[in-house]
Image (tube, rainbow, N blue to C red):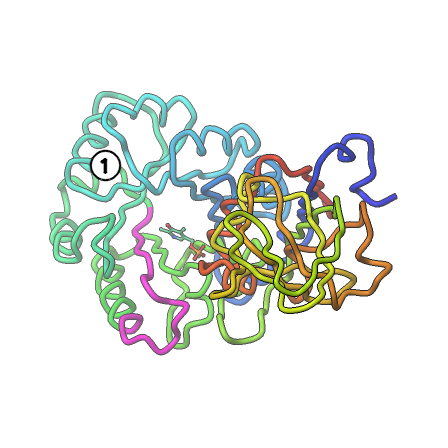
Amino acid sequence: MNAFDTPENAGHGALLTIDLGALAANWRMLRQRAGTEASAVVKANAYGLGIEPAVTALARAGCKTFFVAHLSEAVRARAVAPDATIYVLNGLAPDSGGTFAEHDLSPVLGSHEELLEWAGFRQSGAKVRPAALHVDTAMNRLGLWPGEGLDLAREKTGVIAAAGIGLVMSHFASSEVVDDPANARQIAAFAEIAEAFPGMPASLLNSSGHFLPNCPSYQLTRPGYALYGGNPTPGKPNPMRPVVGLEARIIQLREVQGGMQVGYNGTWTAKGRSKLATICLGYADGYPRNASWTDRSQGGSALVGGVRCPFVGTVSMDLIIVDVSDAPTDAAVRGAPVTLIGGELDLEAVGAGAKTIGYEILTSLGRRHARHYVGL
Ligand SMILES: *Cc1c(COP(=O)(O)O)cnc(C)c1O
C-alpha cells in the first residue's frame, strides 16, 4: 500500500516522506570526507524534518554533538539524546543559565557580556558542560571580533578560563561559492584564532565548507543542509543522498480553452487548449507563493507521471493548479499523487522555481503534511 493510503495519512492532502537512513548515510559521508569528528546542525526543527526523529537517527549513527539555534530546541534535542553535547548557537540569553544547567546544555558565547555572565554563573557553583566561543570572521552577525578573540586568548588567566570554553568556532559567509575570495580570508583569519588557543578543539566547516579546497577540517565539523539532502556544491552534481520527498494529490481535472484566465486575479492565461490539475497543497503548507506562474513570470512545477509540468496562476492557500497537458494520461487522474520534491525536482530546483534557496524550502515544510519516516 502507498503510504498515502494508510488510515492515518488518507485524510491529508500531501505526504512528506523523510528517509532517516539517507540522513544517517549523509552524515557518515561528510564525516569520512572531513576525516574528523562530525556534529549535526539540527536547528529549525532539523531544517523542517523533525528534530526528534532526526536527532534519534543521527545519534544512532554515532553523532555525539548537536547544534541548535534556540534553547527551546536544545531542550527537545536533549529529550532524545541524553548523553550528547548540545550547543545553542544563539548563545546565552540574559538569565537563562539555569535552563542550560538543568538540561546540561552548552551555549555558544559570542560577546563579552555573554562570557562574563556565563563565567559568573559557573563561579556561583553551577555544574555545566564546557561552552563554545564564537569568533566572527566575516558576517558581522554573531560572535566576537577576531581581534577580541586573539586578545582573550592571550590573557591566560582571564575570562576564557572562568567561562570554561571547550570549543572555538567560526562560520563561513560564502562557502557555497568556491571561488569567492572571502573564503580564503576567513580560512586565514580562523587559522590565526585557532592557533591562539593551543590544544583547544576548533570548528569551522558548514556543509559547503567540506567541499572547499585548502580548508582544514579542525576537530569538529558542523554540517546542516547537506545532511538533509541539500546540494553543498551548487551548480555541480549533488554528492548527497536525497532525504525528503513531497507528494500531493490531484483533486480535480479540467480542460480550458485558449484565452481563459486561471487562478486568483487571472494572472495566467491559457495560450491554447490545456489540461489542468488542481492539487491539494498551497502556501499554508509552506510552499512559497513566490512559485506562482503568471503570464509575465515563471514559477514552480510538479512531476506528473515523471513529466515536469509547470504551475499555472497563483499558488493559493490550499491549492496549486498545474498544467498537465504533457503528462501521461494515466498519471493525471483524480486522486493520483504528483511529486513536488523528488527526482529532478531536488531542493535546488524547487528553491529556484520559488525564487529562493533550498534551505528555505526545507525549513518551511508544512505542518499540515502527513509525515512518513522511513529507513530507520
Ligand atoms: C546553520 C549553521 C551551520 C550549518 O550550515 P549549513 O550551511 O546548513 O551546513 C553551521 N554553523 C553555524 C554557526 C550555523 O548557524
Magenta stretch: dominant SS?
loop
Q: Quadrant of the N terminus?
A: top right
Q: Nearer the viewer, residue 269 or 109?
A: 269
Coordinates of residue 58 in the picture (x, y in percent): 59, 46
Secondary element type, mark 1:
helix
Find out if the beta carbon at label 1 lies less than 8 Å from the nearest ligand 1 atom. no
**Of residues 124 and 366, the one drawn nearer to the viewer in this rendering:** 366
* Residue 139 screen position, x and y as percent: 24, 57
Residues rendered magenta in the picture: 167-184
Q: Quadrant of the C terminus?
A: top right
- Residue under the image location 15 percent in, 56 percent down: 150
Residue at (50% x, 45% y) in the render = 364
* Left or right of residue 128: residue 323: right
Rendered residue at 44%/33% (across/down): 74
Disc 1 target residue: 163
Residue 172 screen position, x and y as percent: 33, 61
Name the foreground residue: 350 vs 100: 350
Quick check: 70 above or below 251? above
The residue carrying pointer 1 sits among few (fewer than 14), some (14 to 19) or many (20 or more) residues within 10 Å by Cα, namely: many
- Going 41% across and 76% down the picture, which residue do you hit? 213
Q: Which three-letter amino acid code belongs to the residue tagged 1?
A: Ala
State yes or no: residue 127 in magenta: no
Residue 32 placement: quadrant? bottom right
Residue 180 within the magenta-colored segment of the rendering: yes
Residue 27 showing in the rendered view: no
At which x and y percent is residue 40? 50, 49
Q: Is residue 165 above or below residue 352?
A: above
